[in-house]
Image (cartoon, rainbow, N blue to C red):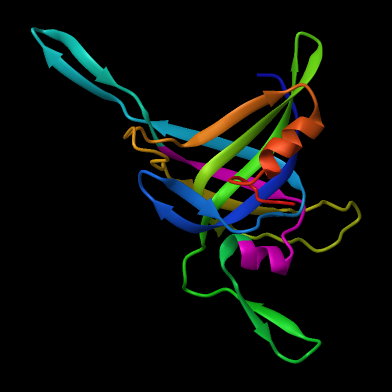
Amino acid sequence: MAYIGLKHPVFAPETTYVPGTGVTYSSGSVIDMACSCNLEITHADAKLNADDVVAETYNGATGGTIEFEFRHLPLADRKTLLGWRENKESTTITSYSETDQPGPYGGFGFIRTVQRNNAVIYEATWLHRVQFALSSEETNTKAENVEFQTAKVTGSILPIYPDATGVAVVRDVMEFDTYAAALTWLNASGRGNIT
């Protein structure tokens, strides 16, 4: 694919997950601004040998990992995405604590811009169940030439059973001719839940 852009990272915290009926989400939000995405879906690699040949194979998706780079990850977004604790120190002062509690499960989506046959299309992706953690943080002192540092998170992608078919699903992907249509799909009820 000739990806030429990345926008609109959305996270919606999971409310419930019941295998066979899918995931429900609370209201989602746009998490800062997107810089880069490294998405890796893992697949099983099973082979059954019989009569001296490979008789059966299985290579279905089993989950994956995502590394997402943001322009900056504000503290309020760290609460939403990573589960940091909010501390009201006074009516005007709020601090945030990174704790030993794991980040929340939730759905995560984004829109990639694609150039194909000299036309631009928009590919929206929704990962049904992800749990993020903050990657290493690096900051340099200001020098003669400013070098921007960004915030990176790493997530574990988990498959879900959305219905009674017994087929696990990792992500949904849709292509649209316009950015507005991709945005509507990604923000819709049952995914981003952004009104």
Identify whether 22 is placed above or below 91: above
Rendering coords of residue 7 (x, y %): 76, 40
Identify whether 176 is placed above or below 25: above
Which residue is found at the position 76% from the left and 54% from the top?
32
Which residue is found at the position 71% from the left and 31% from the top?
112
Direction bottom: furthest residue: 90
Visible residue check, residue 124: yes
Relative placement, left or right, of 14 versus 70 is left
Direction left: furthest residue: 51
Relative placement, left or right, of 16 versus 81 is left
The verdict on residue 69 being magenta is yes
Identify whether 67 is placed above or below 60: below
Identify whether 5 is placed above or below 190: above
Q: Can you tell which quarter of the image residue 96 is in?
A: bottom right
The verdict on residue 180 being magenta is no
Rendering coords of residue 37 (x, y %): 64, 39
Which residue is found at the position 42% from the left and 40% from the top?
162
Depth check: give the residue in front, 149 or 49: 49
Magenta residues span: 63-80
Rendering coords of residue 128 (x, y %): 51, 44
Rendering coords of residue 86 (x, y %): 64, 78
Relative placement, left or right, of 109 versus 71 is left
Q: Can you tell which quarter of the image residue 35 is in?
A: top right
Which residue is found at the position 58% from the left and 63% from the top?
82
- How many labels were placed on the picture? 0
Depth check: give the residue in front, 111 or 5: 111
